[in-house]
Amino acid sequence: MKKTLYEILESMTPEELDLLPEDVFQADVPDDITVQHIRHIVAEKTGVCLADTARISRNKTNTRKTLRRIAAAAVCSILLLGAGVGTYAYAASQKEYKNALAFFYDNNLSTKGLTKTELKKVYRDFFTFSFANDLTTNVILNSRPDIIPGHEISGDETEWDTTMPSTSISDYKTPLYYEYASVFAPIEGTKKEVFEKSTFTKYRNNEKIWEIDFTDFSINGYYCNTESEEDPVLVYGTQPYTSDITDKTARLVALDVDGTILWEVVQNNSSDFDQIQKVLRNSDGTYMAFGRCGNNNEISLCVNKYDKDGKPVFSKLLEINDHAIEHVTPSETGYLLHLSSYVTIEFSRVVKLDFEGNIVGDFRYDSEESDFYISDLSEYDGIVYISGYSTPKAPEKVKDFRQRNIFMLKSTLADTRYADEAISDEELLALFRKQFTAVLLVCEPDSGTPKEFYSVAGSVGDEVYVTDGTVCWFTKDIIDSDYSYTPVIKDGIESGRLDTKYAALCRFYANIFNTDGTFREQKKLDLMTELKWGY
């Protein structure tokens, strides 16, 4: 009867094992079903959602900023699951080495360069989940070339950045910034309001420079080149509905450095509805407007190109329906669009376009265990940086991304454990922090495949920008939380439902590292924000 390697090793004495050369198991071995299963799951986990395995203690004094133990931890848990804990559960001193060898062999792990002592230390790391030995990480990465290394960033002993302005994240990048707002007037005798105007304001060092009003369209956003104030600022919006206007057209306005209108475009892609959602300036001075257009039955994505004087160059409809454009960034070969959809429950889809507006790539970042939400993306020197955050997977029936964000939190709070007693502030904060993990994916632009990632537990990823070889990734760390509920009253009678509100207070951090992956520092900023649900 044929014996397995484990049975052969089991029958050997410690003296016989000592006679084995240390590199006896370094030869390549064929993958079995378990290893194939492991690789499939590992590729999925590490490529998308390793962040949900990251657990960063802010109470420890370890100030080491960049670790790759996250990858090792995730793989180890899968290896143990695939191999069966019972098979290697015991490790008496005389049997530990043979158990370690069998474990390495059965899971196709490399023993290259390891002494017997080191091999046993790595083996112990797998079962204690301490991952205190960097050799464990090296073994994992050497054995699984498809694993993406992860770096966890801790906020321990972070110094304050006293130069941080107190207005917005935009101030941290540049003293020049813009703001816009819309004003609505009440309709007498009703509870309704009517659009009155939109204002667009330029600031420098928190001082207002100029302000301009638009009464014929509501501002949706703007584009500016923060590195060159002399370049035009493009303001875009949508014509509001009125009693005599039922078709909504998009507006695009170019302003000079003094706020004077250079040119204006009324965009209508032969549809009942037209909306510009993002605008970019090409290196040749032309402009790209990305948005949606269509009718009540079908809304498609559209791309419009204009020359430097606002004259149309081309207009193109994309074969993508029921999506909104959340973010756009230029790439070396075109553009990257972050899309979201409540219909298909997609919040982390990235579509790549060439310079003519044709779709040349379509990437999705999610998994069976987690939901991943993109907050921002940027490309620099051929590398794509995607900022976002992961949360535990919510059921498919939950469509709204804000409700998906806190589904597990709501489920926990609705549990009988908290039905008749108040939850402490410490417990509530711990639940909130457990819900969110900030993630920064570093990806290849052609395939969209992540090369590595950074994560911060208990946080939400925010903006990311790259310049002069430096990556600045903003994260929002959850430092306080609130939870309240009141019975819903309808016609003076309790409806049996609860009006529940959730809130989390966050502090901004700036995580700074080089484009080669070297982590430099983390700055704690004097800037707070709130995340709210149910308000």
Image (cartoon, rainbow, N blue to C red):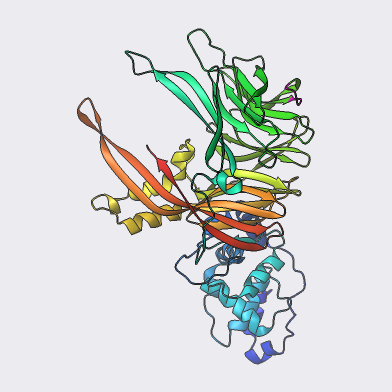
Which residue, as the protein is rendered here, is positioned at the far top? 244
User: Which residue is painted at 72% across and 29% down in the image?
Assistant: 287
Q: Nearer the viewer, residue 113 or 6?
A: 113
Q: Quadrant of the C terminus?
A: top left
Q: Nearer the viewer, residue 345 or 183?
A: 183
Which residue, as the protein is rendered here, is positioned at the far bottom? 15
Does residue 13 appear in the picture of this structure?
yes
Judge left or right: residue 85 versus residue 310: left
For the record, the magenta segment spans 306-310
User: Which residue is painted at 63% across and 29% down in the image?
Assistant: 258
**Vertical placement of 137 versus 217: above or below?**
below
User: Which residue is painted at 68% across and 66% down in the image?
Assistant: 141
Q: Position of residue 44 (x, y in %)?
A: 63, 52
Q: Position of residue 459 (x, y in %)?
A: 49, 53
Q: Quadrant of the N terminus?
A: bottom right
Q: Position of residue 310 (x, y in %)?
A: 72, 22
Q: Nearer the viewer, residue 514 or 231?
A: 231
Judge left or right: residue 428 versus residue 368: left
Q: Position of residue 433 (x, y in %)?
A: 44, 55
User: Which residue is painted at 66% across and 67% down in the image?
Assistant: 140
